[in-house]
């Protein structure tokens, strides 16, 4: 009896992208037929027992059949983008202050101005966002 996965390198497969980074693991015997999402055999690799047992311990990549741990690149969010995101929190605080008849503290007003300057590009020297103030609203 021929198994559907006889065209693949093994009954335990790693599925990988063009960069060799493993995007999925598959134990073929669990499926009565090939899953629709399974790519062609040349986009899979046989998984050695030691790798299979440790597959959940991080990111993996495979090159020429050799598995190694993979460190994904660090994604840096631009400061201007961080500031625009911080403005959403500021807007929530402004809405709460208005609803409760309160105003921003001096620290919060300074924070709003600093974030706005980064978001609109007038502050080009800051390298990090200022810390959110502990006290946002001053009672009326």
Image (cartoon, grey):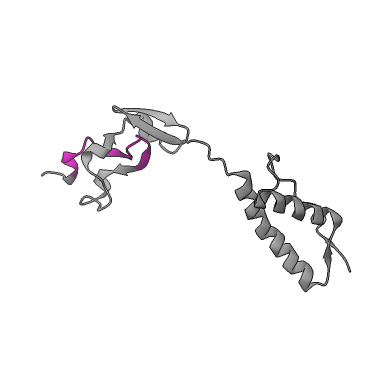
Quarter of the picture containing the C terminus is bottom right
User: Residue 14: image x %, image y %?
Assistant: 32, 38
User: Residue 138: image x %, image y %?
Assistant: 86, 62
At horizontal 38% and vertical 33% (from top left) the residue drawn is: 61
Queried whether the magenta region covers residue 23, the answer comes back as: yes
Queried whether the magenta region covers residue 16, the answer comes back as: yes
Quarter of the picture containing the N terminus is top left
User: Residue 23: image x %, image y %?
Assistant: 37, 42
Viewed as shown, does residue 76 lie left or right of 88?
left
User: Residue 60: image x %, image y %?
Assistant: 40, 34
Residue 134 visible here: no
At horizontal 80% and vertical 72% (from top left) the residue drawn is: 100
Q: Quadrant of residue 5?
A: top left
At horizontal 81% and vertical 56% (from top left) the residue drawn is: 109
- Looking at this view, is 71 or 124 the one in front? 124
Residue 3 visible here: yes
At horizontal 75% and vertical 68% (from top left) the residue drawn is: 96
Q: Residue at the front extreme?
A: 122
The magenta segment: 5-24
Viewed as shown, does residue 33 lie left or right of 47?
left
- Looking at this view, is 24 or 91 the one in front? 91
Placement of 105 over or under 76, stated as above or below: below
Q: Residue at the right extreme?
A: 140
Viewed as shown, does residue 30 lie left or right of 135?
left
């Amino acid at each position: 009896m021929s198994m559907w996965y006889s065209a693949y390198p093994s009954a335990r497969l790693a599925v990988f992208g063009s960069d060799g980074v493993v995007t999925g693991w598959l134990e073929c015997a669990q499926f009565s037929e090939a899953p629709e999402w399974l790519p062609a055999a040349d986009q899979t690799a046989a998984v050695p027992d030691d790798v299979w047992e440790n597959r959940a311990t991080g990111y993996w990549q495979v090159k020429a059949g050799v598995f190694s741990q993979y460190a994904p690149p660090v994604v840096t969010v631009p400061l201007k983008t961080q500031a625009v995101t911080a403005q959403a929190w500021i807007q929530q605080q402004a809405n709460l202050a208005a609803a409760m008849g309160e105003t921003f503290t001096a620290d919060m007003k300074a924070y709003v101005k600093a974030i706005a300057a980064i978001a609109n590009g007038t502050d080009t020297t800051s390298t990090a966002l200022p810390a959110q103030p502990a006290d946002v609203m001053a009672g009326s």
